[in-house]
Amino acid sequence: MSKLKPFCVILTLLVGACGVTRLLGNSKPPPRLFNHKKHVTDEGLECASCHNKATKEDGAGMPVSLKKCMLCHEGIDEQKGEGRHLADLLGEKPVWDLQLSQPEDIKFSHKRHVTDAGVACAECHKDIETNTAISPDMKLTMDDCMSCHTQKKASTECLTCHTEMRDDVPPPSHRLNWIRNHGPVIRTADDSNYENRCDLCHRQDHCTKCHQDEPPANHTNFWRLKGHSVSASVDRSRCATCHQDDSCDRCHQDTAPRSHTASWGSPKDRHCLSCHDNAGTDCAFCHKEGTPSHLDAEDKPSWHTAGMNCRQCHGVTQPLPHPDNGDDCNACHK
């Protein structure tokens, strides 16, 4: 036990150090509460007053020195209390948090949109004139850009906005074991991760066409005999990707379910147990019409009471065509 103590101490220190590193190194600074409403609506400043590169370069640009801001704030700060001056908050060289930065793969030019195409800032940065804080949820999505490009009849080709993503080159996620793993990813993926957006490259019928030629990996012999019924009862919509509505009916007309053994039907009628022992088999899935209804059971004579023991008289000389013990004949025979 004593030999383990040094190892335990070292392990504890390493775990503690990793925890501190995670807390300090990966923590993000709080967003700057910049008030666009105060500057744009209340003070009437133009976007280019601060974003001076938006009309002539790709990037919008931000004030790189305090002098730019102090053109307006010099008189304003004189009325503020100590510690609330802009110089105290920003320093001589402001460092701005890029809350709305896009991935490196995306190429975007403010000049091309603002100056060349005449797109107003508010068309992309909606409600910016009433905004009081910058948050990541203000970031434009691919759907926003595609919708605008479609409306303005601009190009929607991948290379228009992306440097690497193309419809003829699979994304990095499509490597390694993607053929096997793509199913769970598609069902659970967040639409904000565009690498997992099938509709960007594939047509709606692509899944159906592919799986008709190559069955999913889980369609084993066990799947054919037993497994598919469980999956179909949980999520039948997945089956509908390839199978038509009448696929189950057509198959089971030729191949009876494995539960349909020799005693399933008359005279023992073991099929009753599928419901009466709460097994939950949905008979109506196959037998939709033309089958005897439980409501057609013969009525009891008028002198029968609910408290009678049916088995004392019925089933003495020959078995009744029921698999249960007859405790609740009143459920069908009214």
Image (cartoon, rainbow, N blue to C red):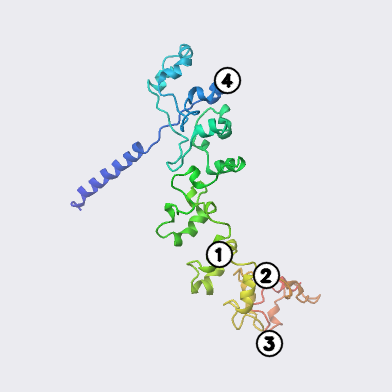
Calculate the distance from the C-alpha at mark 4 to the C-alpha at mark 2.
67 Å
**N-terminal label among 4 and 2:** 4
| Residue 237: % across, % down | 59, 61
Compare residues 16 and 72 and report the one nearer the observer.
72
Location of residue 218 with respect to 117 vertically, above or below: below
Residue, disc 1: 209
Identify which amino acid the numbered label 1 is placed on. Lys
Residue 129 visible to an observer of this rendering: yes
Q: Is residue 1 above or below residue 313?
A: above
Q: Secondary structure at mark 3?
A: loop
Q: Nearer the viewer, mark 1 or mark 3?
A: 1
Q: Marks 2 and 3, Cα distance to the nearest angstrom?
A: 30 Å
Q: Secondary structure at mark 4?
A: helix
Q: Report the amino acid beneath label 2.
A: Ala
Q: Of all residues shown, which one is farthest toward the front?
A: 116
Which callout, 3 or 4, points to the residue nearer the camera? 4
Q: Earlier in the sequence, mark 1 or mark 3?
A: 1
Q: Earlier in the sequence, mark 3 or mark 4?
A: 4
Q: Residue at x 47, y 30 (%)?
A: 60
Q: Which residue carries the number 3 mark? A: 318
Observer-side mark, 1 or 2, equals 1
Amino acid type at image mark 4: Asp
The Cα–Cα distance between marks 1 and 2, rounded to whole angstroms, is 31 Å
Q: Is residue 296 left or right of residue 244?
A: right
Q: Of the numbered discs in the image, which one, if any, rests on residue 330?
A: none
Left or right, residue 317 beside residue 153: right
Q: Residue at x 60, y 40 (%)?
A: 152
Earlier in the chain: of badge 1 and badge 2, it is: 1
